[in-house]
Amino acid sequence: MEINIIPFSSIYAKDFYDLNIEWLKTYFYVEPFDEEVLSKPDHYIINKGGYIFFAISEDEILGTVALMPTADSHIFELTKMAVLPELRGLKIGQKLMNHCIDFAKKNNFKALMLYSNTKLENAIYIYRKYGFEEVPVEDNSPYERSNIKMILNFN
């Protein structure tokens, strides 16, 4: 199966929503902040200087990931990564991760950061494999479910 990574287009907004809602319901629960961001990705991510990418094969969206701007204009949050349930374990998430890291380097980002949960052992393992290091989670984290914050510095 040939997989390509493509940038956001509003025709895929429903795929972005559906993939992420399914993932959240499978592993956690949908927080109001999630519902708001996922239902308006152009407003909350794209129009604020962020990026959304999709893994696609033929005409089917297989997975997605977003890079959201933070208070530091050179650090982006790697977020909203989800892959179709039946295709998990086929390294589609890693292909999306590689794309984000290459994109960040090409665009001179200082770092990528993410929030996760230690219950997601495979994800944490992969983040560490890519060089993400754990940093303290701030008290006002945007996600109730996150208990780990990681950063990948490019300097």
Image: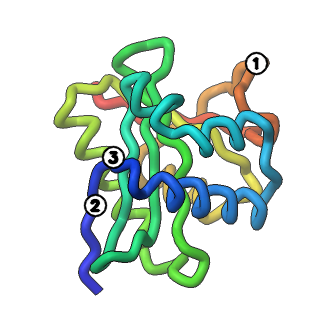
Secondary structure found at label 3:
helix
Q: Residue 13 at x, y = what percent?
A: 48, 52
Q: Is residue 50 above or below residue 59?
A: above
Q: Which residue is mark 2?
A: 5
Return the mark for residue 100: 3
| Disc 2 versus disc 3: nearer the observer | 2
- Residue lying at 76% horizontally and 57% vertically, measured from the top left: 119
Q: Residues within 10 Å of mark 3 (few under 14, many from 20)?
A: many
Farthest-out residue, bottom? 1
Q: Position of residue 64 (x, y in %)?
A: 45, 57
The answer to whether residue 60 is left or right of residue 17 is left
**In the foreground, 4 or 78:** 4
Q: Look at mark 1 in the image and give the residue it sits on.
A: 140
Type of the residue with mark 1:
Asn
Residue type highlighted by circle 2: Ile
Q: Residue at x 40, y 63 (%)?
A: 94
Q: Residue at x 41, y 26 (%)?
A: 47
For this rendering, which residue is in front, 26 or 133?
A: 26
Q: Name the amino acid, label 3.
A: Cys
Q: Position of residue 17 (x, y in %)?
A: 59, 54
Quarter of the image with the C terminus is top left
Examine the rendered structure and indicate whether residue 116 appears above or below residue 87.
above
